[in-house]
Image (cartoon, rainbow, N blue to C red):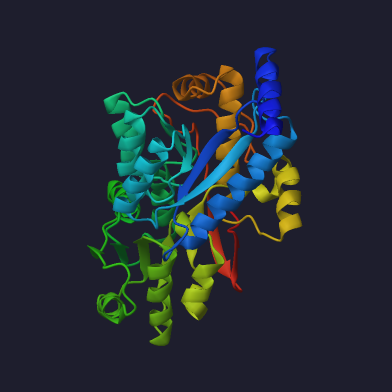
Amino acid sequence: MNPGNACQLSVLALLASMGFAQAQDITIAVAGPMTGSVATIGEQLKKGAELAAQAVNKAGGVNGRNVKIVVYDDACDPKQAVAIANRIVAEGIKFVDGHACSGSSIPASEVYSEADVLMMSPASSNPAMTDKAAEQGWSTIMRLYGRDDAQGKFIGPWIKQNFGSKKIAILHDKSAYGKGLADVVRASLNAAGVKEVLYEGINPGEKDYTAVVNRLKSQGVEFLYFGGYHTEGGLIMRQAADQNYKVQLMMGDSIATPEFGAVAGPGAEGTLFTFPPDARGSDTAKEALAQFKQIGFEPEGFTLFSYATVQALAGGMAKAGSADPKAVAKALRSNTVDTVIGPLSFDQKGDIKDPKYDINVWKGGTYTKLPQ
């Protein structure tokens, strides 16, 4: 052994015995679609988490420990999500900011629950995720985002009021997210006395939805609600525009990305979608926005939700005085934590309390809040 190395080890041992050992970093895994058709959402999760960790560490860390971010790609694929979850568990990571797609989060949550890993999704909205966790007694499965049933209850009455007299179609992409959202919107509309003329699933990943557009045209559809992602929604609207077919599209939160405008082209104009209130205009986000400005990244879509997830996990650790996932989950259910999107609290299922939504409209290549 090199004498210098032996001396260094002796010094480290002495410091450790005196209580001066360097505290180990707290690792938070960011799990989401870093590749694939919705990779922009993965990039949003990654950037949000990384800058949140920087802010937490700059402020002194969590209980004297720094936060470290590691990124995993599930490509929004259930099987890959389970493989990633097993890898995260095997590597001894106890906290997860993710997954994004409900179809990934739901199967991955089973892996995390068995290992007592605290998973907090900043984007998954299918109610089944936390409903199943509550039924099974999995306390470490949470989400920092509103549920589809809350979104459906919000948007159903609005659609009835503004488009209830139109011929309405509801489509979905057969995914846990898309079909789940379409189902709750359909149930909300039907309960309000509005019946759709068409309800069916499409095959995601295709490039030609002309047959879908032709079917909508043939049935005289004037208003289309689509549960799915921006790629398929954008293609449907581009191909409708190619046929000079004007139909009012409304979707959920997945199209809060510039890529929708790029895919849909002129068909994007006037598209409506629901999304939680944009925190970029609030005082709670000022410092974070300055961080994003420095790196030239616009924190659209789920970026600030991922940022807030890291803040919530860190806040839960601080309130618990521990980095034990179960203790942190318990602390989060009984305390309010301050985040970039405002103060948040969680119910016993692990869902955020009292989620809010805005209606947004695409105009001129970007989206803005629709005046209420």
Residue 229, position in %: x, y? 40, 62
Does residue 26 appear to the left or right of 64 in the view shown?
A: left
- Residue drawn where x is 36% and y is 62% of the image: 226
Q: Disc count in the image?
A: 0
Residue 362, position in %: x, y? 55, 67
Does residue 88 appear to the left or right of 54 in the view shown?
A: left
Depth check, front residue: 32 or 184: 32
- The quarter of the rendered structure image containing the N terminus is top right
Residue 328 appears in the picture as rendered: yes
Extreme residue in the top direction: 18
Residue 122 appears in the picture as rendered: no
Would you identify the image quadrant in which residue 313 lies?
Answer: top right
Q: Is residue 210 above or below residue 230?
A: below
Depth check, front residue: 39 or 10: 10
Q: Is residue 118 above or below residue 34?
A: above
Q: Is residue 333 above or below residue 254?
A: above
- Residue drawn where x is 45% and y is 26% of the image: 347
Does residue 344 appear to the left or right of 13 in the view shown?
A: left
Depth check, front residue: 108 or 100: 108
Depth check, front residue: 225 or 210: 210
Residue 188, position in %: x, y? 33, 47
Extreme residue in the bottom direction: 243
Residue 160, position in %: x, y? 38, 55
Does residue 11 appear to the left or right of 106 in the view shown?
A: right
